[in-house]
Amino acid sequence: NKDLAPGPWQQQGVELGATMIIPVPLPIGGALLVGEQTITHLTGDKNSTKTISMGPTVIRAWGKIDDNGSRYLLGGHFGTLYVLVLEHDSAFKVLDMKLEVLGETSCAASISYLDSGVVFIGSSFGDSQLVRLHQEKDEGGSNVE
C-alpha cells in the first residue's frame, strides 16, 4: 500500500543537521531520520522513537541489506562505510540501534547491496567500486575488501 498515513507526524528535538529520510519497510516500518550527529528511527508513536549518536559526519548514500529493513549500509562524505543495525523483538518493535564502521571506500553517491556480502559503491567523486564485506576485520581493522 503506497498511501500516506494520516498526519501530521510531529517530532520534538529533531537535529538541525538532519538531511536524509530512509524508509523502513514493514514489518519494522517507520523511517530513519539521518543527521550529522544522530540517526533516529521514527514510527509515528512517540513512545517507540529510538536515537543513536554518531561522530560528526555527513551521510551521502544508503543501501538496504535485508528485505525486512533491519540492516542498512551508510556512506559518509569522506568514504567511510557504516552498517546500521535495527535490533528488534519478535513483534519487530525496534529495541536498539547499533552503528559500526566497516571500512573505507570511494565517497558513495549510491550503495547497492547485491548478495552474499558483495556491494556496489557508485561514486561521483572517484572510481565506483565493487567490494566484498567480511564478518571478521582484517589486520588493518576493516571489514571491506
Image: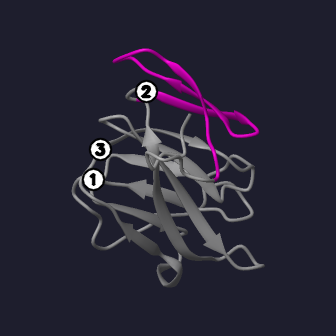
Mark 1 lies on residue: 36
Mark 3 lies on residue: 58
What's the mark number on residue 82? Answer: none
Q: Which of marks 1 and 3 is nearer the N terminus?
A: 1
In percent of the image, x 23 and y 54: which residue is there? 56
Image location of residue 78, percent across then percent down: 30, 35
Label 3 environment density (alpha carbons within 10 Å; few <14, some 14–19, many ≥20): some
Does the segment drawn in magenta span residue 134?
Answer: yes
In percent of the image, x 41 and y 26: which residue is there? 106
The region drawn magenta spans 108-135
Label 2 environment density (alpha carbons within 10 Å; few <14, some 14–19, many ≥20): many
Q: Which of 55 and 6 is in front in this view?
A: 55
Q: How far apart are marks 1 and 3 (CA)?
A: 5 Å
The secondary structure type at the circle numbered 1 is loop
Give the quarter of the figure containing the C terminus: top right
The secondary structure type at the circle numbered 3 is loop
Mark 2 lies on residue: 109
Q: In the image, is 70 to the left or to the right of 105?
A: right
In percent of the image, x 76 and y 78: which residue is there? 91
Image location of residue 136, percent across then percent down: 61, 53
Image location of residue 83, percent across then percent down: 52, 52
Q: In the image, is 69 to the left or to the right of 84?
A: right
Q: Distance between the residues labelled 1 and 2?
A: 17 Å
The secondary structure type at the circle numbered 2 is loop
Q: Which of marks 1 and 2 is nearer the N terminus?
A: 1
Against 12, is 28 above or below? above
Q: Amino acid under label 2?
A: Ala
